Amino acid sequence: MPTLKSPDLEMHYVIDDFTDPWTKPETILMLHGNSESGLAWYGWVPTLARKYRVVRPDGSEAGAGEEGELVHAGPLVAQGYWQDAERTAERFRPAPAFSKLGGTAVWSGDTVAEGKDGLLRFRGRDDAMIKVSGNRISPTEIEEAALASDAVSDAAAFGVPDQRLGQAIVLVAVAIGEEAEQRLLSYFRRELPTHMQPQRIIWKDKLPVGPNGKLDRTALKAEIA
């Protein structure tokens, strides 16, 4: 079953567009998704009434490989956030015009791209995207490249205001071994386009985590602001 895993949100999106009931009701599957749209069950078989679409900024459906916002529609979508009208208005809006389900949809704020294999690739949160010279960059892409270099054990990327670029990329990282910065920059030059190169690298012994054990991005961003 194709799924999308978000490294930041630790969730899986089931993206199959099922039209027929499953023929093996004895099968039990663990299915995950956003808390704004839950799963319902008939016996052992989940009702797959919730649909996912990738939507362009203009409201049209994104093509294969094209980035867009992940939008959830269907009768299992929640009515909103409890006693939070502002957040409800931001995320719970009418479904895209091309959606056959209509009604209210959850506009997740997740930027994804659907490949030709039918899998959705998570790019990042829309509110976390770094915008450099008109290019939208997911912090996750920078962080994954840093970890792949074998020069760092942990990393977090942020966008900071820059008069010339709009935003500049700052990478906070934990070094592995000697000459970590030289090895990291050499890897970035080989593997990343110019607009994705960090303008500054801040080295730390460790990155802060919150009570839930996840990286505390808010605290870290406050430190570098």
Image (cartoon, rainbow, N blue to C red):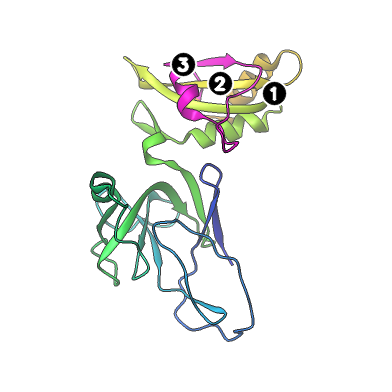
Which image quarter: residue 71?
bottom left
Residue closer to the observer: 93 or 175: 93
- Neighbour tally class for label 3: few under 14, some 14-19, many 20 plus, Cα within 10 Å: few
In the image, residue 180 sits, relative to residue 141, either above or below, namely: above
- Neighbour tally class for label 2: few under 14, some 14-19, many 20 plus, Cα within 10 Å: many
Q: Earlier in the sequence, mark 3 or mark 2?
A: 2
Q: Position of residue 150 (x, y in %)?
A: 71, 28
Secondary structure under the numbered disc 1 in the rendered image? loop
Cα–Cα span, label 1 and label 2: 13 Å
Q: Position of residue 141 (x, y in %)?
A: 53, 36
Give, as a three-letter code, the residue at label 2.
Val
Residue 78 in the magenta stretch? The answer is no
The residue where tag 3 is placed is 224
**Residue 38 vs residue 71: left or right?**
right
What residue span does the magenta drawing correspond to? 197-225
In the image, residue 199 sits, relative to residue 117, either above or below, namely: above
The residue where tag 1 is placed is 151
Give, as a three-letter code, the residue at label 1.
Ala
Query: Marks 3 and 2: CB-CB under 8 Å?
Result: yes
| Closer to the eye: label 1 or 2 | 2
Secondary structure under the numbered disc 2 in the rendered image? strand
Cα–Cα span, label 3 and label 2: 9 Å
The residue where tag 2 is placed is 172
Write the residue at 41% across / 34% down: 128
